[in-house]
Image (spheres, helix red, strand yellow):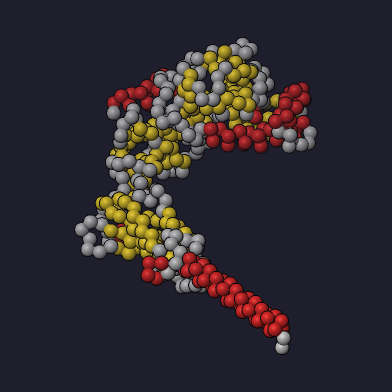
Amino acid sequence: MTRQNRLREFSRRKNKSHFGRFILFVLLIVIAATLAGGGLILFETEKPLVTVPKEVRFLGRNTSIPFQVTDKKSGIRSITITLEQQGESRPIRLYAKSFPRQSWFYGAGPAVVSGSVLFNSKKFKVKDGKAELIVTVHDFSLNRFFKGNETIRRYAVLIDTKPPRISLQHTPRYIRPGGCGIVVYDLSEPAARQGVVVNGVFFQGFPLNGSKNRRIAYVALTWNTKKLGNSMVVATDRAGNEAKDFFSMDLENVPLKKDRIYVSDAFLKRKMPKFKEHYPEMKGSLLDQYLFVNNEVRKRNARHIKEVCSNPVPKQLWKDRFLRMNGETRAGFADQRTYFYHGQPVDHQVHLGMDIASTAHAAVKAANSGKVVMAEYMGIYGNAIILDHGQGVYSLYAHLSRFDVSPGEMVEKGEVIARSGATGMAGGDHLHFSMLIHGIFVTPLEWWDQHWIDMNINDVLNQL
């Protein structure tokens, strides 16, 4: 072999040796990176996340404690929930659960666990007072010498197994369909929910004159009430303990007036196009459209009014009797209306207010002081305003031609808030006036009567 060939062979072998070492180096780097990556996964240090709702700070006789645990890397290995009280030798275990390992990398356990613990004071034999709820969670990481990452969350709680005490101070003796009254009662402790239930309807109670313990609730009956069922004050404290105190009232029936409304073609031609603008889904003849408005739109309006009256101002804004607009009464509360078209009865509805006719575009004044919570077009009522007088008392003004106030404004008794008109289903210029208790229509006659207000509200409160 010549010298030149020997040099070539040596160079070839040298290059091959360098390439082999390079391949080995790359393999070592890949192995090291894999081991390092695996180590980062196996020994990840992210702790599990524990969530317990803020409202779980009071534990009653039977309280559900919801929780959620999250660990989106190695996954959840175990969850333990305990309760500790001073003077007790060891914590009370409320919940414990472990999960089997599913892999050696991410997702070895569930990423999210949601559940609830039912705390029963008798079962766990605890005493009323302060305690600490402790949630301990481990994941499947090999961190901390293979023990896994640990999260311990502590929540201060109060164990309360005694329901509130209710002391009735006043209940109405008599009440009529479409009528109302007040219930006054004392509570021994703050309540998460309290009020009065009459015939299955809940009426929220409010602090009386800023009192810490005394509450007042305005109650009402619908116009068509035939009998009285159970009436009671109910109170649920923050730990979920419920108390009830029953009372009785006598139902005074009132006669109902019947009325006939004659619907003409001229009225339909004048009114239905305007309703069509707001309710384009109306179909059929003018009579079909009229019946749609008088039924379906009326129901929608009732739901909207109920919603508007669902969040009353907690303090009394009104004082003494409500003002009645000067004018002639054209229709009364709970009038039973039968509608005739071409001499035939086509519909039946109940009139839930008082119609008062004065001069055209007469000034409409606030019947009492309050807050404007609605001023808008509302179907059969046309342009309408609702005032919140506090603690569940509302007044409604309908068929208006103009608004002089806007939602959110505070108005004084006797202040001009609008002008009368013939919007909505009105046949001519007049004011439709309604009174409501928590969204239930009641007769305005009681609220226009100072003697009734004195006998049923003012004198009662002054004597307590």
Front residue of 172/431: it is: 431
Q: Residue at x 41, y 67 (%)?
A: 143
| Relative image position of residue 288 (x, y in whole percent) | 75, 35
Q: Is residue 354 left or right of residue 134?
A: right
Q: What count of labels does the image hold?
A: 0
What is the quadrant of residue 211 in the picture? top left
Q: Is residue 306 left or right of residue 425?
A: left
Q: Is residue 48 left or right of residue 441?
A: left
Q: Quadrant of the N terminus?
A: bottom right
Q: Residue furthest bottom?
A: 1
Front residue of 108/453: it is: 108
| Relative image position of residue 325 (x, y in whole percent) | 53, 15
Mark yes or no: residue 262 visible. Answer: yes
Q: Quadrant of the C terminus?
A: top left
| Relative image position of residue 95 (x, y in whole percent) | 37, 64
What is the quadrant of residue 90 in the picture? bottom left
Mark yes or no: residue 448 visible. Answer: no
What is the quadrant of residue 282 in the picture? top right
Q: Residue at x 32, y 36 (%)?
A: 185
Q: Residue furthest left?
A: 87
Q: Residue at x 62, y 36 (%)?
A: 300
Q: Residue at x 32, y 64 (%)?
A: 93
Q: Residue furthest top?
A: 359
Q: Residue furthest right?
A: 285
In the figure, 317 relative to 152: above or below? above
In the figure, 335 relative to 37: above or below? above
